Image: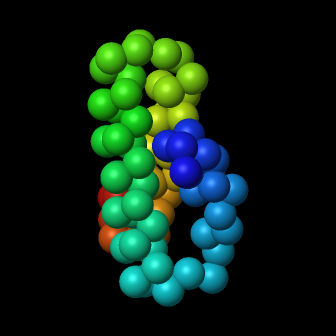
Amino acid sequence: MDLLEEAAEFEKAKMSHMSTSDRVHASREAKRLVLAINEMYKKTKDEKLMDAMKRITAKKKKIEVRLKGRSEIS
C-alpha cells in the first residue's frame, strides 16, 4: 500500500472508544507514517505530502493528550 493511502486510512479511522493500548499503537503508527512521509518530502518538496503530515500530526497530538491526560493549569 502506498504511504499516502496508508495515511488516508489512518485519518479515516475512528478514534473513539479506544483502549489505552490501542491509543499507544495508533500514536506509534502515526509517528511511523509521519517519518516515512517526511523522507519522501525531503526529496520531492511536494505540498500534498506536507499537508498529509500536518493532518496526521494533529490527530497524533489529540491521541497523546488523551493518553497523558490534561495537566491542570492554574
Residue 66 image position (x, y, % from top left): 45, 69
Residue at screen point 46% across, 36% down: 53
Numbered disc total? 0
Residue at screen point 63% across, 82% down: 17
Q: Is residue 9 left or right of residue 21?
A: right
Q: Is residue 30 left or right of residue 39?
A: right
Residue 48 image position (x, y, % from top left): 57, 23
Q: Quadrant of residue 24?
A: bottom left
What is the residue that sits farthest to the top in this orientation?
A: 45
- Foreground residue, 10 or 59? 10
Residue at screen point 63% across, 55% down: 9
Q: Is residue 13 above or below residue 22?
A: above
Q: Is residue 25 left or right of residue 12?
A: left
Q: Is residue 50 above or below residue 57?
A: above
- Foreground residue, 36 or 30? 36
Residue at screen point 52% across, 17% down: 47
Residue 38 image position (x, y, % from top left): 34, 32
Any part of residue 72 in sight = no
Q: Quadrant of the C terminus?
A: bottom left
Q: Is residue 48 above or below residue 64?
A: above
Any part of residue 12 in sight = yes
How was this image coloured?
A: rainbow
Residue 54 image position (x, y, % from top left): 49, 34
